[in-house]
Image (tube, helix red, strand yellow):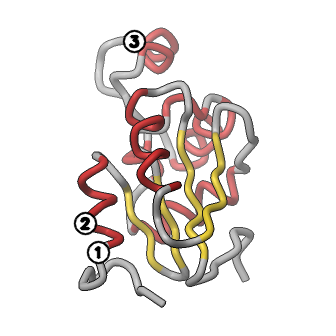
Amino acid sequence: MGSIARDSRQITFFYNSESSLGKQINAYVNSAEKEVLGVDVSKTKVTAKQWAEIADGLEKKISELIDQDHPDFKSEYGEDSVDLDEKTWLQLLEKNPKVLKNPIAINGNHHMNLDSAAAFKKYIEPDSAGLEKN
């Protein structure tokens, strides 16, 4: 059993309220016709176990969730390409969640890495394969 609640009647939304993309998509998510559990990663601790669970649901590596162009990342690791093991990527995201690349929505067992507000709009459309409408 996972550590993140999954309910088809609720959208669990992980975002950074300090990023413009996070703020923009948060407005769209909160206008959805479902209950929203917003997790602002800049204010709420998300554990390494939860990040691993999210990455698994997205079928992505942890490194793919991290914005390697973020100033905080670059100040720590420099401009060059970085090759870290999964445990180190998890620790990085857990300790500095501001480097989260894109907001993430979870509805039931459906996960979506949201790179734009339009992506969320498509995600909540009734015919969308990504989200069941009740």
Q: How many residues crowd mark 2 within 10 Å: few (<14), some (14–19), many (20+)?
A: some
Look at mark 2 in the image and give the residue it sits on.
122
Using the image, tell me which numbered label, if any, was put on residue 117.
none
Q: Residue 109: x percent and y percent?
A: 51, 82
Q: Is residue 117 left or right of residue 86?
A: left
Q: Quadrant of the N terminus?
A: bottom right
Look at mark 3 in the image and give the residue it sits on.
78
Residue at 45% in and 17% down:
77
Using the image, tell me which numbered label, if any, was put on residue 125.
1
Front: mark 1 or 3: 1
Q: Residue 89: x percent and y percent?
A: 53, 41
Q: Nearer the viewer, residue 106 or 30?
A: 30
Task: Determine the secondary structure under disc 1.
Answer: loop
**Which kind of residue does numbered mark 2 sit on?**
Lys
**Which kind of residue does numbered mark 1 sit on?**
Glu
Q: Residue 25: x percent and y percent?
A: 41, 45
Residue 129: quadrant of the picture: bottom left
Residue at 69% in and 69% down:
4
Asked if 108 appears above or below 114 in the picture, the reply is below
Task: Determine the secondary structure under disc 3.
Answer: loop
**Which kind of residue does numbered mark 3 sit on?**
Gly
Q: CA distance from mark 3 to mark 2?
A: 36 Å
Q: Which comes sooner in the sequence, label 1 or label 3? A: 3
Q: Is residue 12 left or right of residue 119?
A: right
Q: Is label 1 in contact with label 3 (beta carbons under 8 Å)? A: no
Q: How many residues crowd mark 3 within 10 Å: few (<14), some (14–19), many (20+)?
A: few
Asked if 126 appears above or below 75 in the picture, the reply is below
Task: Determine the secondary structure under disc 2.
Answer: helix
Q: Is label 1 in contact with label 2 (beta carbons under 8 Å)? A: yes
